[in-house]
Amino acid sequence: MLWTVYFTAAFLLLIALFTWKGHSMHLFEILTVWMAVVFMDDLYVASLTLQLGWIETSGVGVTAFVRMIHLQILTPLIVVWGMSLTDRIRPLYGKWMAGAATSLVLALIRMHLSSCGVIRIVTEKGRIVDMLEALLLIVYAFAVRAAYRVLLRKDGLRL
């Protein structure tokens, strides 16, 4: 039951994101940010689960499928959606608030996964780092997009 909820939510968000006419990101920007977020999120989970043992994951059946949907589809989708929303807001404080709201949504989804038993946070450090990771992921995504835009401008392209 849990995996159908996540799969349906990810699918609907994906459809809404790519059919939304007001997004300000180029397709290659979306793909670059998407891949960077997947890379950093996988690196984060691997380092905290395999190296430090702060988070335990279930690698069996439906929970592994839900975790993979969360890591590969839902998290980058929410980050890209939040970035596109942030671009539409004019005042700087509004941009900061939209970034914080996106980070909060990511942290709440991760807490929901923890409460459903998909992941288990073992130590208190893991819980603190888990909430901080959502904020750092947003900052990292904006940095990747800014670097990508600089590279495009060097080639003479404007977005």
Image (cartoon, helix red, strand yellow):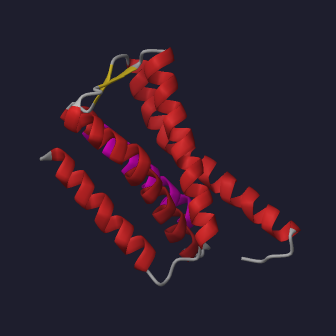
Taking the spot 27% from the left edge, 60% from the top edge, the residue there is: 9
Q: Residue furthest bottom?
A: 21
Q: Left or right: 98 with respect to 24?
A: left
State the image quarter where residue 83 is shown.
Answer: bottom right
Tell me residue 16's x, y (percent): 36, 73
Taking the spot 26% from the left edge, 41% from the top edge, the residue there is: 112
Q: Determine whether 158 is above or below 107 in the image.
A: below
Main SS, magenta residues: helix
Tell me residue 148's x, y (percent): 73, 60
Tell me residue 64's x, y (percent): 29, 35
Q: Residue furthest front?
A: 61
Taking the spot 28% from the left edge, 26% from the top edge, the residue there is: 58
Taking the spot 47% from the left edge, 53% from the top edge, the residue there is: 76
Q: Left or right: 81 with respect to 5?
A: right
Q: Say how many tags the image has.
A: 0
Q: Determine whether 7 is above or below 45 in the image.
A: below
Inspect this view and state whether residue 132 appears. yes
Q: What are the residue bounds of the magenta stretch?
A: 94-112
Tell me residue 71's x, y (percent): 41, 44
Along the line of sight, the residue nearer the viewer: 120 or 123: 120
Q: Quadrant of the C terminus?
A: bottom right
Along the line of sight, the residue nearer the viewer: 102 or 146: 146
Q: Residue furthest left?
A: 1
Q: Does the segment drawn in magenta span residue 11? A: no
Inspect this view and state whether residue 104 appears. no
State the image quarter where residue 61 is shown.
Answer: top left
